[in-house]
Image (spheres, rainbow, N blue to C red):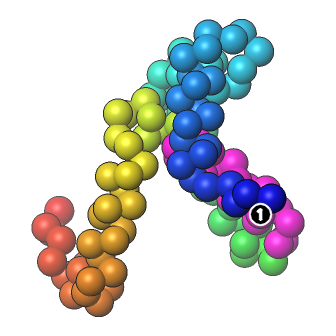
Amino acid sequence: MAEFSFSDLETIIRERAQSGDPDSWTAKLFARGIDKAAQKLGEEAVEAVIAAVKGDKQGLVSESADLIYHWLVVLGLSGVPLGDVLKELESRTRRSGISEKASRPKG
């Protein structure tokens, strides 16, 4: 079995977003826009945190899948390719997390 990747999911989301299929949750989210997709992303993040705090491993797996999906939808709606996020993460591995965080602009 081939390994499923974030890139695979990003491609599926892009295809479904463009499908116009009225039965596609992805197409509906894209039609509703960034506000609705960002709201769903936040809800899934909270649900993942709750599952983690409760020690609900299966719940955490399920909510994490929802979180990743909605995160990729928000990236897609924002015109941010997954590759850009991966490049940012890769650049951060070249230095310690403490020094990387200290180098961020204060805001």
Q: Amino acid at mark 1?
A: Val
The quarter of the image holding the C terminus is bottom left
62 or 14: nearer the eye?
Answer: 14
Confirm whether the magenta stretch covers residue 64. yes
Which residue is the site of mark 1? 61
76 shown above or below 31: below
Q: Position of residue 48 (x, y in %)?
A: 69, 61
Which residue does the image show at 86% across and 66% down from the upper left? 58
Which residue does the image show at 37% across and 34% down from the upper left? 78
Which residue does the image show at 72% across and 72% down from the upper left? 52
40 or 94: nearer the eye?
Answer: 94
92 shown above or below 61: below
Neighbor class of circle 1 (other Cα within 10 Å; few <14, some 14-19, many 20+) is some
Q: Position of residue 76 (x, y in %)?
A: 45, 34
Which residue does the image show at 53% across and 29% down from the upper left? 14
Q: Position of residue 62 (x, y in %)?
A: 79, 56
Res. 31 image quadrant: top right
How many numbered marks, from 0 up?
1
